[in-house]
Image (tube, rainbow, N blue to C red):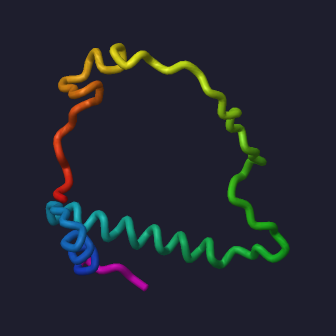
């Protein structure tokens, strides 16, 4: 499958992105090169090779959840542009 300039223009339109004509041509070449390389990778014999999610063995390194003292309300609100009744006051972003 070969990506055409028209394909890239269509994706740009759907994504609401605008690019100069010369960049669209460059993106078309780059996407086709990527697909050609992906096709090369699809031809690699992986018979008997275990799938991996990461090249290094990983383990959960999360710390234990421990309750600790938090900032005093006055200190937390000290740099707030606006506050109301001891809380941060922010602009409304949803109707309802």
Residue drawn at point x = 74 percent, y = 46 percent:
58
Position above or below: 66 against 1: above
Residue located at (70% from left, 33% from top): 64
In magenta stretch: residue 25: no
* Residue displayed at 22% across by 77% down: 10
Q: In the figure, 53 relative to 9: above or below?
A: above
Indicate the quadrant where residue 51 lies.
bottom right
Q: Nearer the viewer, residue 8 or 84?
A: 84
**In the rendered structure, which segment of residues is drawn in magenta?**
1-5
Left/right of residue 57 with respect to residue 6 in the rendered view:
right
Q: What percent of the width, then of the height, locates residue 72?
A: 42, 16
User: What kind of secondary structure does the magenta stretch mostly adopt?
Assistant: loop
Q: Looking at the rendering, in which quadrant would you find the C terminus?
A: bottom left
Name the outermost residue toward the front. Answer: 85
> 11 left or right of 44?
left
Direction from residue 61 to residue 29 in the image, left or right: left
Q: Is residue 3 magenta?
A: yes
């Amino acid at each position: 499958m070969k990506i055409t300039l028209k394909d890239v223009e269509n994706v740009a339109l759907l994504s609401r992105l605008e690019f100069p004509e010369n960049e669209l041509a460059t993106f078309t070449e780059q996407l086709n090169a990527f697909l050609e390389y992906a096709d090369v990778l699809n031809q690699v014999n992986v018979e008997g090779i275990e799938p991996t999610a990461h090249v290094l063995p990983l383990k959960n390194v999360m710390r234990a959840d421990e309750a600790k003292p938090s900032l005093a309300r006055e200190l937390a609100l000290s740099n707030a542009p606006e506050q109301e009744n001891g809380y941060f006051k922010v602009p409304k972003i949803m109707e309802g």
